[in-house]
Amino acid sequence: MAFTAFASTPAVEQAPRKRSFIALVLLLPGILYLVLFFLTPLISLVLTSFQQPVLDGDIGEYQAGFNWQNYSDSVGEYWPLILRAFGYALVATVLALVISYPIAYVIGVKARRWPLLQSLLLTLVIAPFFISFLLRTLAWKQIMSDEGPIVQALKAVAILPSDGHLTGTTFSVIFGLTYNFIPFMTLPLYATLERLDLRYIEAGADLYASPFTVFRKVTIPLSMPGIVSGTLLTFIPAAGDYINASRDFLGSSSTAMVGNAIEANFLVLQNYPAAAALSIVLMAVILVIVGVYVRRSGTEDLV
Amino acid sequence: MAIASFAESGADLQLTGITKRFPGFTAIEDLDLTIPAGSFFALLGPSGCGKTTTLRLVAGLEEPTEGKILIGGKDVTETKPYQRPVNTVFQSYALFPHMTILENVAFGLKRRKIGDAVAKAHEALKLVELDHLASRRPAQLSGGQQQRVALARAIVNRPALLLLDEPLGALDLKLRRQMQLELKTIQTEVGLTFLHVTHDQEEAMTMADTVAVMNKGRIEQLGAPEELYELPRTAFVANFLGQSNLFTGDVVASGPDHITVDVAGVPIVVPRIRSRRHAGEVAIGVRPEKVTLLTTAPAAETGRNVLGPGRVTDVSFSGVSTQYLVEVPHVGELVVFAQNMVFGPVVNVGAEVWLSWNVEHGFGLDDEPGTVPRFVADDSTESIAIQRRIALEEELEQA
């Protein structure tokens, strides 16, 4: 008995071992890619964030070290920009959600009976991607410029004071962020709403719920997977964005976000440790926010 | 908001002149229907006959093209689904996947702001014996359990009218029997009006007080199950509710109590009151279990019709009874059900037999003459097999 038991053990184990070997081979390219292009730069970034200046060296010359002060210094100097980045990203995400939800609902639910219309509308949502977003953002700068028709009109009806501007304001930066990220919000929302089973909505109406209550209690909870992925796809890149808030585009020095500070430190001031420290702070804060958000939104049951 | 209290008792439902057209086809044509309060009413028909559309019209999920819908004497044609004193047990159950079983059941009560919603939901779950699963999610339940939750979610609201859309379709046979009994018990206990839509004739006959057989957007016949079975008015009813042997022929003699029809040269007698047409070419029939198989030619006898001789072409044993197919020259194939009083079949394939039945068991149909071929085609085993397969495929599709 004992002998047969021993003899049969390797045979049983062989199958899963073989399978895990194939799995490893299949995963290898991905793992290599991540090690090379994600892990290596990440470690390099962490090391850079602790570097200290070379004594009597040139500007931008640093050596390995363990300079904790890089973090406290850069956060101490740039905390308003960090706060502003998350504030802008939050407002832009909420605005993009409010604008995208009806669009996604129309395409995914109302237009279901006309597949041709559905794909046409979907193409319109994606169409802006065919033009570089730098160009599109510059175009908005033109449209909102002081000589442009919008500013002129707003001044004419005294909504904007005679010395007012649109570009370089909080408004234009949030506008740009919202505009640029709307497709990233609309597409995941559409993907969820397109699969929404309308029988649940009928069941809600049958159970005495008014259309508004059905929307609140049935439609919204059932579209949570789309809302969560849409808000993440908008919030994360928006928080680190440095194009919209840049002086060359829709922003000014008073609207600078943490992304602009990182850019300036890396490319202009050549203060690499400060830029690296800011990047890591940005990454850590986003990780914490996203972690809490995904936990709280309770989408585990739906996805 | 809708009605803020429970219905005291079931309400009657009245449909007058309902027509529903979809782009390209008419689902329901000028339908008049009255369902008395407190009754268990079944709408029976094949798929695509308009029965589910009728149900959705009553629930308010579709709007009729023409006609009026009255519940308890009140015109609800223009009102929205959430304003109607009606609840539906959906074919797909449509339990909210993001809520627990308890939240699902309490949903309707909370919308109507009825006090003690949670306690009442627990009570309804106890009624369907699922209170121990109250905190689970629908996805964690089996099909039968989900069905019972769907029932509890509708019943807890004490609607004046409960609509059941093939709610037992996805259940296996044993569970379906059990649920049929439970439904019937609940209906009698609570006294609500039930409108049950099904394509399962056995389910309709065992559960409902009144059955309406629907075909192509019209009601073919309406009545108590026994009445429909014993005296079908049309070939469609005769074949959809059970099986029938149908013949056509000219009326050759018409007496005060009986008419005689010439079926391929054989005089067949049908009671006058059991037949719809009394002159010209008519269609008549008899149920397979009313027919007796004889191995010798019987002596002519008043009060019995005799056909034969014919040849047995197929024998299939099904436990309580045996089904024989008998080919009678010039008449066609007949079906005979014989109870298994002895062991196994009485005759084998190829045997020569005569068929005989009591004159009083025959019935005459209302159908227009000229639709003859379909009678013959409809009760062949092949077409029955096709029908069964279609029904099965539908069930699988829905599951």
Image (cartoon, coloured by chain):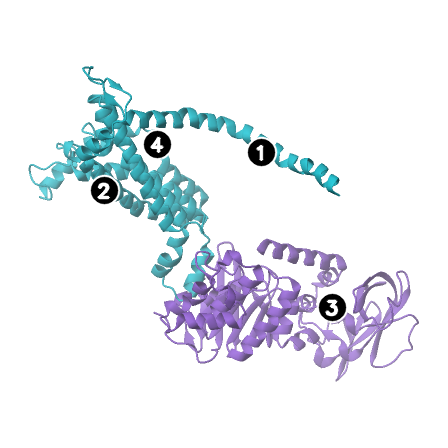
Chain letter of disc 3 in the image: B
Instruction: Kindly identify the residue that appears in the image at 23 percent across and 39 percent down.
Output: A175
Which residue is painted at 35% across and 34% down in the image? A127
Q: Are marks 4 and 2 in contact (CB under 8 Å)?
A: no
**Amino acid identity at mark 3:** Ser
Q: Is residue B356 above or below residue B100?
A: below
Answer yes or no: are tags 3 and 4 on the same subunit.
no
| Badge 1 and badge 3 in a common chain | no
Q: CA distance from mark 3 to mark 4?
A: 67 Å
* Neighbour tally class for label 3: few under 14, some 14-19, many 20 plus, Cα within 10 Å: many
| Residue to which mark 2 is pinned | A87
Q: Is residue B383 above or below residue A130?
A: below
Callout count: 4
Chain coloured purple here:
B
Separation of marks 1 and 3 at Cα, in angstroms: 63 Å
The chain whose colour is cyan is A
